[in-house]
Amino acid sequence: MAFTCATGKHRRPSRVKRTTTNAVGVAALTTTGVIGALAAPAFAAGTPVDQTGLIRAVSMGDEVAAKIDAQAAAQKQAAELKKAEEAARKRAAEKAAQERAAKVRAAREAERRRLNAFVAPVFHSYVSTGYRTGGSLWSSGSHTGIDFHAAGGTPVHAVGSGTVVETGWGGAYGNQIVIRMNDGTYTQYGHLSSIGVSAGQRVTPGQQIALSGATGNVTGPHLHFEARTSPEYGSDMDPVAYLRAHGVNV
């Protein structure tokens, strides 16, 4: 005799129905991840699919994916912006370095030109006695240099870059300075009232080296200037031509 179970609200779901529901929940979990997990309880309760909230779960999943995509896009944009900023900083640094290098080169070139320049030994003056002027005032019978008009105590300047090789008393020249110039020539400054440099000292164009005076064989204060091929007396050359060859207007 066969027995049947009466239907009613206390009747448990059949084994087939439970298995089917669980399978649907597992499938949803496997396919959608978080969405399946959210939907599984509804399936386990035996509610029909269209009432489980699956559509809502899928919508939530789309929103999460959209947020992730937006975050990824924002991160990518931030990375690209950072890269662009770093490139801009690099370009700015390179430009600044180039500008500094250009300034250094310009300063070096200006200094090189300054050191190679020549000036008159007495500023704002003129030649009062020319080269090779004859007369009894000079033991050689003629003037071995040129005289620049200068009152006593007038600043005397090195005409160019060089090294002082001699200072002190020079007989008829009185107090004198002899400088070996960078080009191998020599310049001499005589009749000085005071000397401001010493032997071995480097000098630059326009540097004050002494004060003019009337020491030695003179009739009044002035600066005696000579250009020479050696530091010795008798190796003189035309000082006016020498200074003009180096760009000095005398």
Image (cartoon, grey):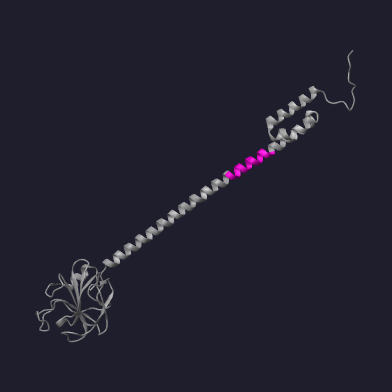
* Residue that protrudes farthest toward the bottom in the picture: 219
Is residue 211 placed above or below 98 in the rendered structure?
A: below
Q: Residue at x 41, y 56 (%)?
A: 97
Instruction: Measuring from the top left, give residue 50's x and y in whole percent.
Output: 78, 29
* Numbered marks: total: 0
Is residue 173 placed above or below 244 in the rendered structure?
A: below
In depth, the one of 135 and 116 nearer the eye is 116
Whether 85 is among the magenta residues is no
Q: Residue at x 68, y 30 (%)?
A: 30
User: In the picture, residue 111 is in which quadrant?
Assistant: bottom left
Q: Residue at x 90, y 25 (%)?
A: 8
Whether 66 is among the magenta residues is yes
Where does the N terminus fall, quadrant-wise?
A: top right
In depth, the one of 52 and 180 nearer the eye is 52
Q: Is residue 14 left or right of residue 86?
A: right
Instruction: Measuring from the top left, give residue 122's x and y in whole percent.
Output: 25, 77
Where does the C terminus fall, quadrant-wise?
A: bottom left
Q: Residue at x 15, y 82 (%)?
A: 171
Q: Is residue 171 left or right of residue 6?
A: left
Is residue 69 placed above or below 248 in the rendered structure?
A: above
Instruction: Measuring from the top left, give residue 214's x and y in whole percent.
Output: 20, 85
User: In the picture, residue 37 is in which quadrant?
Assistant: top right
The magenta span reads 63-75
* Residue that protrudes farthest toward the top in the picture: 1
Is residue 160 placed above or below 7 in the rendered structure?
A: below
